[in-house]
Amino acid sequence: MIEGEDASLNRRRWLRPTIWIWLAALLAGGLASPRASAFTPYTTFYKDAYGQLVQIQSAYKPFDVIGRDFTDAGGSEASRDEAFVAALNQPQDLFVDGRDQLYIADTGNNRIVHLDETGRFVRALEVKESPLNRPNGLFVDPDGSLYVADTGNQRVVKLDRDGKLLREFKRPESPYLPAAFKYEPTKLVVDKRGFLYITTLGAFQGLLQLDPEGSFQNFFGANKVSFSLFDSFKRFVYTREMYRRELSKLPGAIVNTAIDRNGFVYTVTKDIKNDQVKKLNIAGLNQLETRGEFIAAKDASYGEVAWWADRASVPQLQDIAVDADGNMTVVDALLGTISQYDENGNLLFFWGSQEISATSKLGLVKSASSIAATSKGELLVLDNVNNLIQRFKLTEFGALVHQANKLTQEGRYEESEPLWREVVRVDAFYTPALIGLAKAAFKKEQFEEAERLFFQAGVGQGYSDSFWQTRLLWFQNHFALLMNIVVAAILLAYLTDRLTRKWPQRGRLKEWLQSQRSLFVQLRHAGYLIKHPIDGFHAIRHENKASIASSLIIGGAAIASFSFVKADTSFVFNSSVYTGVKLGPLLVQFLVVWFGWVVSNFLVSSLMRGEGRLRDVFNGSAYALFPLVVVGIPLTLLSHVFTLSEQAIFGFLQLALIGWTALLFFWMVQGIQNYSVGEAVLNIVFSLLSLAVMGVLVFIFISLSGELVNFVYSLYQEVVIR
């Protein structure tokens, strides 16, 4: 008994210090510097070729916050640091020079703040000889000269490296500058020639381009105006003065700009759905509109929207940063989402969080006003509400993607292959990695492997080019055999026809088939319709060349062909097969529209004194679908042989299928109802309108029925509960 008590006491002696050790460890972890934390308070995504969001490992991780622990370069005391931090007021721009020195446009305090590469305070520039007024943007050239967009004073000032005023760029005098143009500079960049590219508040004409002397040169990189069918209607109805006042017809105003080491000028625009980011050469042409060798088709939209946000929302991009490799990083002012693209505009990844912190929490931005990149690949995001800068650095995964993608962009596909394989080992479906591996396989002439990888990545152009090479090799190896089979088939058909031409059984069989009013003859009548459509439909009405049974068979064949076309057309011409085709809803829509057409056309024809009966309209509408069988199936099979080089041929055959079917429906109305051309056109128009009205009525009926069911169920619950 005593031994048990001694053992219990020993356990208590060991347990008490162990608990204190654990508590101390937890407390130390909670008080650790944010620089040591590996936790990312946001989620990182990428999108496949069809816009599906996929979560991946973090590409960047936050490691520091600048603005809470500034230290003067001369060794000032902490009290002075705190006063300086409190003095920051709504900073609007951030610039990193070639030495990774930081410059902040401290708009609320009318000054420029200079920090060293570690984020320590160096100096504050206020230009005492000509004070700044709400500076919103800045730029530092390679010589150290500082350009400031002094918005409140409606000017741009140039300072030397010591902060002394060198010159002012006020509103230029030019007959080519509109009189109503408001010169309120907000952001700017300067190229190697000394030309200034200035964004002005609310100006839709583009960047204002000035020469080194401040003379107006041109408007640069203006956005285009979108134009819809409704806009054309308004142009037809509105007076010229009314249409001129349409604000929606003004192009989006550029809100920010940047320039890279190669002289490309980048622009950022808010409140537009496409082309929010442009990469402009010296002629003002957008280089992101051009497509690379195997670039997937894009809608040219930049600024990603995460799953927790409204997918219909328009990106509110605020700024862009371009790193040494040409990768573009943009930040959304509303959502705080950061999106990164390579130099060709292909998405690498984006990240953000549902949590919007009003405090200076590591990695979270309350309101992003600017973003910049350092020579080390770090990203700096300026928060103009919390008055601080969030610092992010690449994770191992992000650095691996950057290194591999750089090699791919340079055309060094084989060197990038082992790096991409390492990325795929981490994330097997990462689209840029699949594209990089596919390009490497194509380079090594492993075309079947390239096909497989391009298909997984959803890149139709690359898949088509790989298949073109595979097809070429197959024809080179099997051309002789293929031609022998074709010649043998032609000879066999010719000899069979010659040898059986005088057989009495052949003639009697042909006469018997022609004399029979059987199901076979009715099915065979679909072939006659191809040659003589009007007479063929007239025969359906007056000679009973169709029946419900034959129509159901032909209609069923058409539905099967429709399903085959939708589900089995090659990925090159039908990208939806990548994500999977849901045939159920498509078939329901097809049948509802077809039956609705039959009913509406019969009702309209009855009012317009047509001669067709309901069964005639039913039979004729079924036979009019026959091109789906005759053309749809062969065209689908051909899609597996064609590449995008034959897209014009494939598209023409698709249009021919649609046009032929539409003409058969027109001739069906004309032949069965015994109408003239004008009467048939009028009948079809009224039938389509009736079909639309029927659809609206059915929708209303279903909606009201649902409400009625909910009301009855609620009433039942009320009665049962009480």
Image (spheres, rainbow, N blue to C red):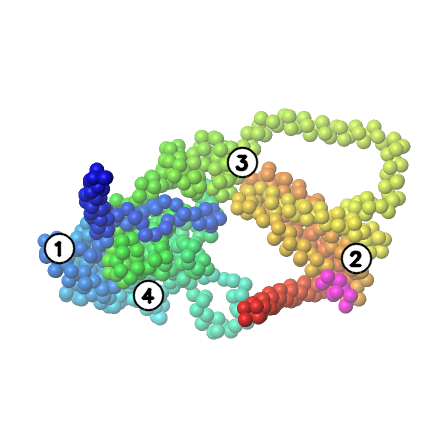
Q: Earlier in the sequence, mark 1 or mark 4?
A: 1
Is 154 situated left or right of 523 in this image?
A: left
Left or right placement of residue 592 versus residue 359 in this view: right
Label 3 crowding class (10 Å Cα cut-off): few <14, some 14-19, many 20+?
many
Residue found at x 81% / y 51%? 546
Element under label 4? loop
Badge 1: residue crowd in 10 Å (few <14, some 14–19, many ≥20): some
Q: Spatial distance from mark 1 to mark 2, Cα to Cα?
A: 92 Å
Q: CA distance from mark 2 to mark 3?
A: 48 Å
Q: Secondary structure at mark 2?
A: helix
Q: Which residue is mark 4?
A: 201
3D distance between C-alphas at marks 1 and 4: 35 Å
Rendered image: mark on residue 615: 2
Q: Nearer the viewer, mark 3 or mark 1?
A: 1
| Range covered by the magenta-colored residues | 599-607
Camera-side residue of 668 and 211: 668
Tag 3 residue: 467
